[in-house]
Image (tube, rainbow, N blue to C red):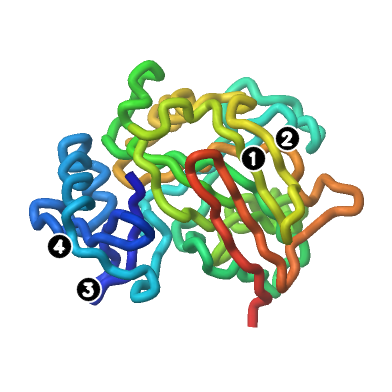
Amino acid sequence: MKLVSYQGDTGPRAAGVRDGELVDLNRADPRLPSCIKTLLGQGSESLGRARAALQTGQAIPLEDTKLLAPVPNPEKVICVGLNYADHAEETGAKPPAEPVLFNKFPSSLCADGDPIILPKLSNEVDYEAELVVVIGTAGRHIPKDRAAAHVAAYCCGNDVSARDWQLRKPGGQWLLGKSFDTFAPLGPTLITADEIDTPGKLQIQLRLNGRTMQNSSTSRLIFSVEALVAYASQVCRLVPGDLIFTGTPSGVGFTRQPPVYLKPGDTVEVEIERLGILHNPVAAET
């Protein structure tokens, strides 16, 4: 099932996608919550009810709505560094023995079709195609062999990064370099986990102005989805709607000779097998 959030009269509302149109799930079945985080957290019973509502509910044309990031207000956006061996190699880093976690501010999220805004404070903005995990059932100290049960959905993400901030500011400003507004495109939809039985075997690509820059498979992840969920949950309670950006493969811009950074007028596409294509134009800050 494909899920999105759109801007309703009272705020973000959860919808399903049917034949290119939206169905507001709460309006189709008032027993369902209007908040996508609440829906994901209610588990398989509510998602089953949502599937039924999606088939019978009144459709809303896409052109009549403003799509938001599929999870517009997550509590946490957790990111994983150096999680593909080929990416570690291209950066000159040794593959880590444990996951390397950092985060982005939730305010950096933007939706499919929204522009990535290049800040005036950076001249080295880079792209990173990533598989994103969306938490459903909350949990702390989640065993690896039970971690999949806590995942509600998957989608495409782009961990946009200001490399000059991330790598050359005093102490390394990973948080700020990754958290400028619009630096976390997400979408185009959530695909519920029941439709993705092999998250570790998906082709992942990034295209810049039609040119393939990254082309890999999630089979090359150093730490699996299950391992990442288990590891992060040792530190903090994962809650519905939390996002885990699972890392990027080789081909990022700052390792190329010469480096390739985003510029106004570019178009970036992240495509992950069975999850769709996330499109974002690039524009300068005004």
Number of marks in the image? 4
Q: Are marks 1 and 2 in contact (CB under 8 Å)?
A: yes
Residue drawn where x is 69% and y is 50% of the image? 172
How many neighbours does mark 1 have within 10 angstroms: few (below 14), some (14-19), or many (20 or more)? many
> Depth-wise, is mark 2 or mark 4 nearer the camera?
4
Q: CA distance from mark 1 to mark 2?
A: 7 Å
Q: Which residue position is annotated with label 2?
A: 87
Give the residue type at disc 4: Arg
> Depth-wise, is mark 3 or mark 4 nearer the camera?
4
Relative horizontal placement of residue 11, taking residue 31 as reference (left or right) = right
Residue drawn where x is 22% and y is 37% of the image? 43
Numbered disc 3: secondary structure: loop
Locate the N terminus by quadrant.
top left
Residue drawn where x is 45% and y is 57% of the image? 106
How many neighbours does mark 4 have within 10 angstroms: few (below 14), some (14-19), or many (20 or more)? some
Q: Which residue position is annotated with label 3?
A: 10
First in sequence: mark 3 vs mark 4: 3
Q: Which residue position is annotated with label 4?
A: 27
Give the residue type at disc 1: Thr
Give the residue type at disc 2: His
Res. 152 image quadrant: top left
Of residues 255 and 34, the one nearer the viewer is: 34
- Height in image: 214 above or below 180? above
First in sequence: mark 2 vs mark 4: 4
First in sequence: mark 2 vs mark 3: 3
